[in-house]
Amino acid sequence: MSTLFLNKDEIKQLTGAHKPSIQAKRLQAMDIPYIENKIREVLVSRTYVESRLGNKTKEEPQVKRPNFEAIM
């Protein structure tokens, strides 16, 4: 089960930085939105990053359509 936010290691990997202030600057440069919590940790939406990188974790649901050719 994935979590709402990237974990600390994933943010370090994404930004290449360990320090939250540098992570924030690099995320801004990459146009990736983030928030900081009360203890100044950087939080990044997992869904946003996955969609931006083109990683679809869930398959698109198949839409069932009627077979009108069977009627004729």
Image: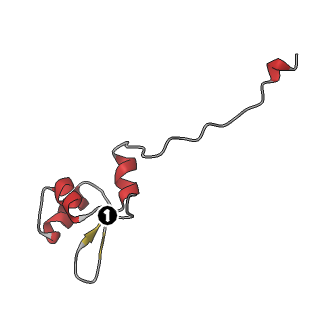
- Which residue occupies the extreme bottom position in the image? 38
Classify mark 1: helix, strand or loop: loop
Question: Which of the 4 quarters of the picture holds residue 33?
Answer: bottom left
Question: Which of the 4 quarters of the picture holds residue 35?
Answer: bottom left
Query: Could you say where residue 22 lies in the image, as x and y percent from the top left?
Result: 13, 66
Q: In the rendered structure, which amino acid carries the disc numbered 1? A: Val
Report whether 48 appears left or right of 30.
right
Camera-nearest residue between 28 and 41: 41
Camera-nearest residue between 22 and 10: 10
Above or below residue 21? Residue 13 is above
Query: Could you say where residue 19 lies in the image, as x and y percent from the top left?
Result: 12, 69
Q: Which residue is mark 1?
A: 44
- Which residue occupies the extreme front position in the image? 1
Above or below residue 51? Residue 35 is below
Residue drawn where x is 42% and y is 44% of the image: 56
Report whether 63 appears left or right of 15.
right
Residue drawn where x is 54% and y is 41% of the image: 60
Q: Quadrant of the C terminus?
A: top right
Query: Could you say where residue 43 lies in the image, as x and y percent from the top left?
Result: 29, 68
Residue drawn where x is 47% and y is 45% of the image: 58
Residue drawn where x is 16% and y is 70% of the image: 20
Q: Quadrant of the N terminus?
A: bottom left
Query: Could you say where residue 24 lies in the image, as x and y percent from the top left?
Result: 21, 66
